[in-house]
Image (spheres, rainbow, N blue to C red):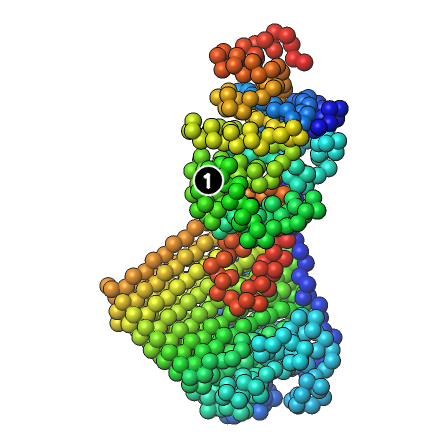
Amino acid sequence: MSTTLNVVTGQDYKYGFVTDIEADSVAPGLNEDVIRFISAKKGEPDWLLEFRLKAYRHWLTLAEPDWAKVSYPRPDFQKIVYYSAPKAKVAKYASMDEVDPELLRTFEKLGVPINEQASLAGVAVDVVFDSVSVTTTYKEKLATVGIIFCSFSEAVREHPELIKKYLGSVVPAADNFYAALNSAVFTDGSFVFIPKGVTCPMDLSTYFRINNKESGQFERTLIVAEEGASVSYLEGCTAPQFDTNQLHAAVVELVALDHASIKYSTVQNWYAGDKNGVGGIFNFVTKRGLCKGKASRISWTQVETGSAITWKYPSCILLGDDSIGEFYSVALTNHKQQADTGTKMVHIGRNTKSTIISKGISAGESSNSYRGLVKVQPKAEGARNFSQCDSMLIGQACSASTFPYIEVQNRSAKVEHEATTSKIGEEQLFYFQQRGIPAEEAISMIINGFCKDVFRELPMEFAVEATKLLSLKLEGSVG
Amino acid sequence: MTTGVPMLSIKNLTASIHGTPVLKGIDLEIKAGEIHAIMGPNGSGKSTLGKVLAGHPSYEVTGGEVLFEGQNLFELEADARARAGLFMGFQHPIEVPGVSNASFLRLAYNKKAEAEGRDELDPLEFDDFIHEKIKLVSMREEFLDRSLNEGFSGGEKKRNEILQMAVLEPKLAILDELDSGLDIDALRVLGDAVNKLQRADRALLIITHFPRILETIQPQFVHVLSGGRILKSSGKELAVELEERGYDWVLEEAAAGGAR
C-alpha cells in the first residue's frame, strides 16, 4: 500500500470532545420501573405509558436481528442508561438565556445555529442533547402559518391528539427488535406538523448529540404533512469519542397525505470508533415513510459517514395511488466500520413509482453493504421502480456487497436494477497527480463525481457540508 | 535557452518494483530544445523509466540521481513534479467515471497556474481557452463534457493525453507509446500537434517500441534500452536502422562488447 492513500484517509474525528455538564440520569438497566420513571419524568398521559409497556413486553419476546452483514459484540441492554438529561435549573427553558452556557458553547463548537439572531436565516433547529430536546428555534414564526415544530415531549403535552393519532402508525411498536426497544424507552426527538396546503417556508432541522458515555440515544421523530403540504427536513448528528460503544436506536415516522411531499435529508456523522475499531456508535435505526395519500411523495436522502455499525433502511410504503418514493444514499465506511444499509420500497397503490440511487464507498478494512427490497403488491397496477447501486472501493482490504431483493406480484410492474463496482487505486491517483493535482483533491474530485447523483438531491448547505465531510473522512485512506 | 545546464540529467539511475530491479544504471542528458527517443524491445524498462521520472508510487528508486532544471527530482511528490513542468502522456490513460473531462482539465490547469503565480481561470474563461486547444488535436467538443476517458476509444484517449499536454504546456513531456492504439491519420494529427508544442525552451522524450512515430516527431537522439540499461545511443539514423533490422543486432553487439 502506498502512503498517499493512507495519509488522505486517516483524519481524526473533530467532534469527539465531551461536554462537562451535570446530568440527571437514571441508573443503568432496563425494566418496567425504568420505563415508568421515564414516562413520569415527562409527565406523560396513561395511554403513552401503556404504549411503552406494551412495546417493552413485546421486545422481551424478540431476538436481536442477525441477518445483516455486520458483526459486533451484542450490547448488554442492562448496562445502558436509558435516561440522561443535562441538569436544568428550571424545568423547561423559557428562553435561550436560561440554557446552560456550557451547552450553548457545545453547539457553537459543533457549528449548529441555535441562536436565532446569530444563525444563518432559513433553517429552524430542534436540538437534542442525550435524551432531551434542548431548544427549538423559529417556533413562533412557524406557528403563524400553522406549522408545529417542537420537541417530541412538548408535542405529547401540547398536541396529544396528533401524537395519539400518528405515533406508531408507520412503524408499529412491535415492528422489529430495535423499534420495539425505542417504543419502550424513547426519550425525546422532534415533531413536525405541516397543515393542509402549507409549504414550509424554511428548512427544518434536528441536531442530535450524544454526550453521556453510558447512555443510549433513543429518539423519536414524527413528521406529518397534511393534504398539499410540503416540507424539507434535515437531520445531523455527532457524538464524543469514547472507547466504549454507545447505542443509538431511533425511530423516524413520516406521513404524507394527498399531494403532500416530505423531503428528509440526513448527514450522519456519529463517532465511528478509532482505526482499530475500538469505540463508536451502534446505529440501529428504523426510518419509514408512509405515502398515505394520492400523489404524495416521500424522499429520503442520506449521507452516512459515521458510526461503528450502521443498520438502517429508510423505506417508503407507497399506499396512495400515483405516490412516489425516493431513496438517495451515500454510505462511506473507513477503517473497521461496518454498514448494512439500503431501503424498502413497497408498492401498494396504483401507478406508484420509486427510485433508488445508492452509492457505497469503502476504504480501510471496512465492510459496506447495500440491502434493498422492492416489493410490488398484487394491486399495484403500473408500478415502476428504478434502482442503481454503485460501489467504490479504496485500497485492498475493504469490501462491498449488494443484496437486492425484488418481489413482484403484478404483471404490469416494471422494475429495473443496475449495479456497478469501481475502484480508486494507485493508478487513478497517479494519473491525477501526474497532472499536478494533489492526492487529497484527486480523491475529493473522484468521490464527488461518484456521488453527484445523490449530492444534487441535498439542500445546498448540506451538499457543501457533505462534500467536505467525505473528503475529511477519507483523509489518509488511499493506498 | 541555456546551453550549459541540461534540463534533465539522469546519472546511474537504478530502480526496482516489488524488489525486482528494472532499471540497472541509466545515464541520460536532455537539453532544452531537444527531442530524444527511447526505443527497445518489450519489457526492456522503457515505460518504467517514464514512470520513475514521473513519480509512480509502485517503483522504488534504489540509486543514482535525477536533476530536473538543477533540482533533485526525487525530493518532489508526483504532483509537484507535474507542476514543475514534467508531463507524462500515458500509454493506457485511466478512466474516471463521474469526473467531467473539462473540470479535470481546468483543475489541472489551475493547479499549475497557482504554482506559477498566474491567474486561475474560472469556468467561463476556461471554456474559451479550451476551445482553442481542442482544435490542435481535432477533438470534438462533446468530449469535454464526457467523463474523463470513460468509454473513449484508444485513439480518443491518446487525443485527450495530447490535449492535456497542450493545456499544461510542460517543459519536458515524456510520451509513453503515443502510437499504440492510433491509426495512421490520428498518429499524424497528434504527431503534428506535439511538433507544434515543441519549442526551443521545451524538450521531448518519446518512448516507443515502433519507429513509425519517429517519422512524424523526429528526434535528434535515439537510445536503445534493454535489460534496464541504455545499450546504444546515436542520431536519428538509428531509428531507421532499427526499423530495418529490429533490435537483436543491438543486443548482440552489446553482448559482444561487454556491458558498460
Query: What residue is shown with label 1?
Result: B139
Q: Which of A355 and B37 is in front in this view?
A: B37
Q: Is residue A308 above or below residue B172?
A: below
Q: Nearer the viewer, residue A237 or A73?
A: A237
Residue farthest toward the top in the current orientation of the protein: B256
**Residue A476 placement, left or right of A249:** right
Q: Is mark 1 on a helix, strand or loop?
A: loop
Residue A380 horizontal/vertical position (percent): 28, 70
Quarter of the rendering occupied by the N terminus of chain A: top right
Q: How crowded is mark 1: few (under 14 residues within 10 Å), some or many (20 or more)?
A: some
Q: In this view, does B34 lie above or below B158?
A: above
**Residue A454 placement, left or right of B87:** left
Q: Nearer the viewer, residue A153 or A446?
A: A446
Residue B234 horizontal/vertical position (percent): 61, 14
Q: Residue A428 lies in what quarter of the image?
A: top right
Residue farthest toward the left in the current orientation of the protein: A411
Residue at horizontal 41 percent and vertical 53 percent from the top: A419
Residue A25 horizontal/vertical position (percent): 66, 81
Chain of the residue under label 1 = B
Residue at horizontal 69 percent and vertical 44 percent from the top: B116
Q: In this view, does A474 lie above or below A50?
A: above
Quarter of the rendering occupied by the C terminus of chain A: top right
Residue B144 horizontal/vertical position (percent): 48, 46
Q: Identify residue type, mark 1.
A: Met
Q: Is residue A41 visible?
A: yes
